[in-house]
Amino acid sequence: MLGAVDFGEADRIVTLFTRGHGRLSCFAAGARKSKRRFAGALEAGTHLTARLVSTRGDTHRLDGVDVIKSFHRLRDDLSYIARAMYCLELCRELTRDHQPHEPLFDALVQYLGLLEERKAGPTSLLKFELDALQYTGFMPRFAPCALCERETGDRPRFDPEHGGVVCFSCSPRVPRGIAVRPEVVDALARLQAGERTPLPQELRARSRDLLNLFIAHHLGRRLNSVEFMEQVGTD
Ligand SMILES: [Zn+2]
């Protein structure tokens, strides 16, 4: 469950991220009043089984839900809430209705579980983002150079429009590219390749800046939860 907005006096429009059908919006009649049918289950981040009834066109009615996992212990700590909200917003914005992304769904459930068990450090959030981008077809390139395929070298530049990092020889072709430190490029390339070594805070912060830039470029706006993470002081 990704989020919900109130509709009218008693109802809610609920956005679900489903394993088999991708993102779906559905109408939950009486969700603001009926304690019995939805019993607090319509909280963002809850993993649930949803009973949906197809109505006209692409709309669905949510008939009832069974909670599989509420991840309620996530809600004890603002920094965990902020990271979970960020992941949910990322999934909501990177996916489209009715386009299944099963690996992303599984990665989200796994990540929220690890987060709740306090087993997911900040570096694993960067890894989740890189995986989410890959699963949805937006994978940024950190190595080799996105234009010439050679090593990115010691003066790389980053340009989301050209898919990621380019080497110094190719930099005249990306006038909007920004200079990045080679160790940041290297850290992101290693994470992308599956390495799990936790990164120091400074390197994480620079890596986050690059990913924020990349995601904002592709979505046309910054994610709202980035600001929340900054306010809470987590990464
Ligand atoms: Zn190049």
Image (cartoon, grey):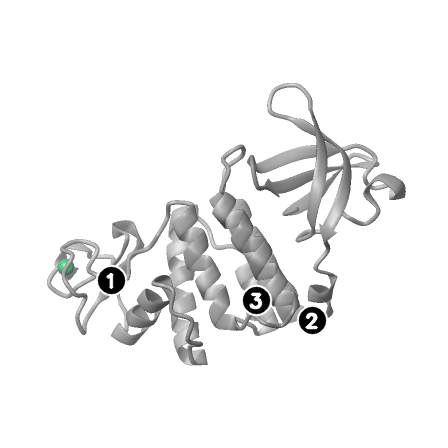
CA distance for labels 2 and 3: 12 Å
Mark sitting earlier along the chain (1/2)? 2
- Residue type for callout 2: Asp
Q: Residue at x 42, y 54 (%)?
A: 215
Res. 109 visible in picture: yes
Q: Secondary structure at mark 3?
A: helix
Quick one: which residue is furthest to the top in this view? 56
- Residue type for callout 3: Met
Coordinates of residue 46 in the picture (x, y in percent): 69, 52
Coordinates of residue 141 in the picture (x, y in percent): 28, 57
Foreground tag (1 vs 3):
1
CA distance for labels 1 and 3: 28 Å
Q: Secondary structure at mark 2?
A: loop
User: Mark 2 sits on what residue?
Assistant: 77
Mark sitting earlier along the chain (1/3)? 1
Q: Is residue 231 toward the left or the right of residue 77 in the image?
A: left
The tag on residue 229 is 3
Q: Residue at x 45, y 79 (%)?
A: 201
- Residue type for callout 1: Ala
The tag on residue 143 is 1
The reply to whether dot 1 and dot 3 touch (C-beta < 8 Å) is: no
Vertical position of residue 74 compared to residue 67: above or below: below
The tag on residue 82 is none
Say whether mark 1 is within 8 Å of ligand 1. no
Mark sitting earlier along the chain (2/3)? 2
CA distance for labels 1 and 2: 36 Å
Q: Residue at x 46, y 50 (%)?
A: 221
